[in-house]
Amino acid sequence: MVSDFDKNYINGDNIAMHTRKEYIEYTTYMMGKAPNLLKGVEKFTRIPYMLPKLDLVGVPLLNAYSMENWGLNSYEEFYVTLSEDSQTEDKIQGSMTVLHEILHQWFGNMVTTPWWDHAWFNEGMCNYLNYYITSIIEPDWDLDESFVENVHQYALSWDEYDDTHPLTFAVSTPNDIENAFDIITIDKSAAMFRMLKCVVGEEIFRTSVNKYLNDFAYTEAEPINLWQTFDNVLYDANYVIEDGVTVVKYMDSWTEQPGYPVITVRSTSNGSVVASQKRFSLSYPSLGTNDEKWLVGLTYTTETEMDFDELTPSVWLKPTDDHAVLKVPENFGWIIVNIQSTGFYRVSYDEKNWKLLLIQLITNPDRIHVLNRAQIIDDAYHLCRAELVPYDYYTSLLEYLLMEDHVMPWNTAINGLSSIMDAIRRYPTEYSKFKKYTQGLASILYDKLSENRMQNATTKIGWSRLLTWTCKMGNSRCAQSASRHFDAWMKGHQIPSEMEEATLCAGMKKGNVAALSKIYKLYKTTRSPSQKEIILRALACTNNVQSHFSQLNLIRLDKADSGSLKTFKTICDNLVTTSAGVRGLAGYMAQLLNSIKSSPILDNLQKYIAVAYAALAPKVATDDEMFVMDTIKPSGLSIEINITVSKIHQTIESNLLWMERDHEKIIRAIEM
């Protein structure tokens, strides 16, 4: 590295921080954190850091968010320039970003894979251990819950279509390498390592990883080498997972084929409970035969046992099995499979068990672990879409939210509700009814938020997002409160942190020049990455389509770089949360398409087209929006971009067919 950066370090420590002179004072917070993060990895791996020094460099603009060069980790500047006064969300982002690249010193640098076919291997391990180690260092940050919501559930939703790819797949070109780093590679892989840890237990997991690192230090290794190491450690410990089940067989079944199963659990006439599997798919119409079967470790508990802490599978469902029998006590009440969402699968039940779970949730939801409350909601929504359960199961479950005072199940519910809202816009009468129904839930949520009953430990991150959603749903009390806070901010008062996004959103709706000018000035001057994200989300609140064009010009398409592409993606993702934003973005792309095609930096700009198209695809619903999408569907571009866009277009068609099939069913369910 050649620079005129300044250096911050602690005498006697082997870690130094480098960044621009004007920001070096802001590195003190992360300098205090970094040694503990490094020690956390050393303690987990039981292998001391292998180099005499570790430099952490904050770069104004980086081609990737961060990079794990051996002994010289580089980060986008704002990840390492924080202070004690920074928002908790920024501290979490900063700590986990720094830790992720420190982890790569062991997983990727000290031991590396021969080729990019296994890009997921080190990425998944670092992503999982990032949450695991940070949660030990900062237990108040609720990272176990964050992992399930932001990694596990997100990966499930990406991997539920027939055209998804397995974790291990052929990579042959530079574009293949770049495209390999998707949600499957980054998040599904992390969920796989969490699942494996629960199968073998924490001590075997750590011992196996330590032995693998020592055995393959400074050489190449493939996933099979780690799986074999696990099996050797299990053999030495005289630990048998299950007859015929090895880690090699187990992990191969999950990494060598795409998708994941839905486990169907039902009681039989003789009183036993059985579980069977088939591949879960939301593709409509289905593109494949769905023959895949997995080696599935099942965890479960019942109403009489109430054990939500035993995460080691007690029953195994093998690919060759027609079903597996779950041992349950007499008069066991309800059963819940997949404790704390440790297994990468969805679960469906028979009608009786769904009803028993609903009764439990309505009467005393806290008897069920919060991760399983969120799992039940998430699974029910996706099972309805797959026509495996009726919609009234899902809408009945949502009624229990009246009793729910935890952030995570609410966030999970809102994800499903928002997807339906986006798609049902194609049918104005049904859309109006569903919006009214959703506004009723938003009113319940606002009461809980205003009375400060929502639990989210110390961060209030999810709390803030819920509050913003209630305002966006048109809750009058929320809107009035946000408007008052905005008027006070215009006069120089501070906005409460949990109200910031809702308040700036209210300001955008006012739409006057003074308000827009002050919001934009804050965007240009703030040092907080989470605040920048909040402002970009708030920009989407305007109902003025022309205003959306000016927002898109926050980045310059004639000067493409990674920073502007990231900003462009954030703007696109948030513009499409409203119908006006969908029209604005589609119109913008139609207007620019010809000039983009003739750009001297076409290769980079094609990524902008793909980003915009990907943001629009799950949101377009009406005929005029579909017409614009057909108009801006790129042609004559690179093969890779055309393949990406074709897959995205399948999402549009699938959503349209889904809503054509189900819009009346959904309305009947909310009117029951």
Image (cartoon, helix red, strand yellow):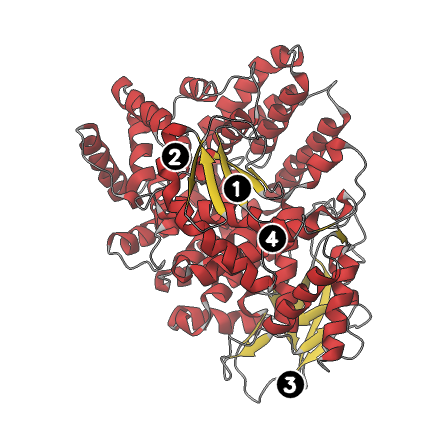
Check contact, mark 4 vs mark 1: CB within 8 A: no
Residue 73 visible to the viewer: yes
Instruction: Compare marks 1 and 2 and give the one earlier in the sequence.
Output: 2
Residue 386 visible to the viewer: no
Count of labels in the image: 4
Q: Which residue is mark 3?
A: 271
Q: Residue furthest front?
A: 12
Residue 335 lies, in percent from the top left, at: 56, 76
The type of residue carrying mark 2 is Ile
Gap in Å between the C-alphas at discs 1 and 2?
A: 14 Å
Q: Which residue is mark 1?
A: 55
Residue 126: numbered disc:
4
Residue 35 lies, in percent from the top left, at: 46, 53
- Closer mark to the observer between disc 4 and disc 2: 2
- Closer mark to the observer between disc 4 and disc 1: 1
Q: Nearer the viewer, residue 545 or 14?
A: 14
Q: Nearer the viewer, residue 550 or 72?
A: 72
Task: Name which residue lies at 59% across and 75% down.
Answer: 300
Instruction: Compare marks 4 and 1 and give the one earlier in the sequence.
Output: 1
Q: Which residue is mark 2?
A: 24
